[in-house]
Image (cartoon, rainbow, N blue to C red):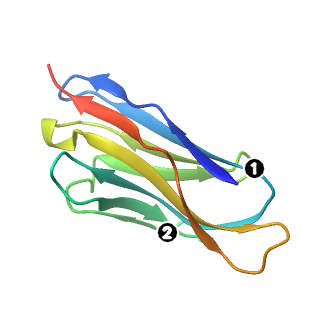
Amino acid sequence: VQLQASGGGLVQPGGSRRLSCVASGSILSIRSPGWYRQAPGEERELVATINAGGGTSYTDSAQGRFTISVDNAKKTVYLQMNSLKSEDTAVYYCNAKILARGTYSFVDYWGQGTQVTVSS
């Protein structure tokens, strides 16, 4: 089981970017997918999460600019980021609790991280 994040890159202030995170392997169930980020010299912080009912939660700085969504059939979670600012520059990590086939408890998995740099 693994999470593979992609979509990072260089974007100008005010621009948009969509991150994707695909879960692969022998997966029975996925819970609480979310996105975190870590800027240089800072601690990793929660950016957005989505629950099984589609309810979403965002950090204050992302509210109104970022949108998290899930495609269950594709086992993919997205983070649409609009109106990007320099302070959004960070490595973005996806996270989810996954129940793998042949196991009996959910385990926390992390993607490898994808760099988003907002700069002109």
Residue contact at pointers 1 and 2, CB within 8 angstroms: no
Extreme-bottom residue of the structure: 104
Left-right relation of 21 to 72: left
In front of the other: 120 or 101: 101
Residue at image position (48%, 52%) is: 94
Which quadrant: the C terminus? Answer: top left
Quadrant of res 118: top left
Which quadrant: the N terminus? Answer: bottom right
Quadrant of res 57: bottom left
- The numbered mark, 1 or 2, whose residue comes first in the sequence reads 2
Residue 102: x, y in percent?
85, 71
Point out which mark residue 88 bears.
Answer: none
Residue 91: x, y in percent?
32, 42
Quadrant of res 14: top left
Residue 66: x, y in percent?
34, 48
Left-right relation of 70 to 112: right
Left-right relation of 91 to 87: right
Q: Is residue 84 above or below residue 101?
A: above
Extreme-right residue of the structure: 102
Residue at image position (43%, 43%) is: 113
Q: Nearer the viewer, mark 1 or mark 2?
A: 1
How far is mark 1 from mark 2, CA to CA?
18 Å
- Mark 2 residue element: loop
In front of the other: 111 or 20: 111
Q: Name the residue type under label 2.
A: Gly
Q: Name the residue type under label 1.
A: Ala
- Mark 1 residue element: loop
Residue designated by label 2: 55
Residue designated by label 1: 73
Residue at image position (37%, 45%) is: 92
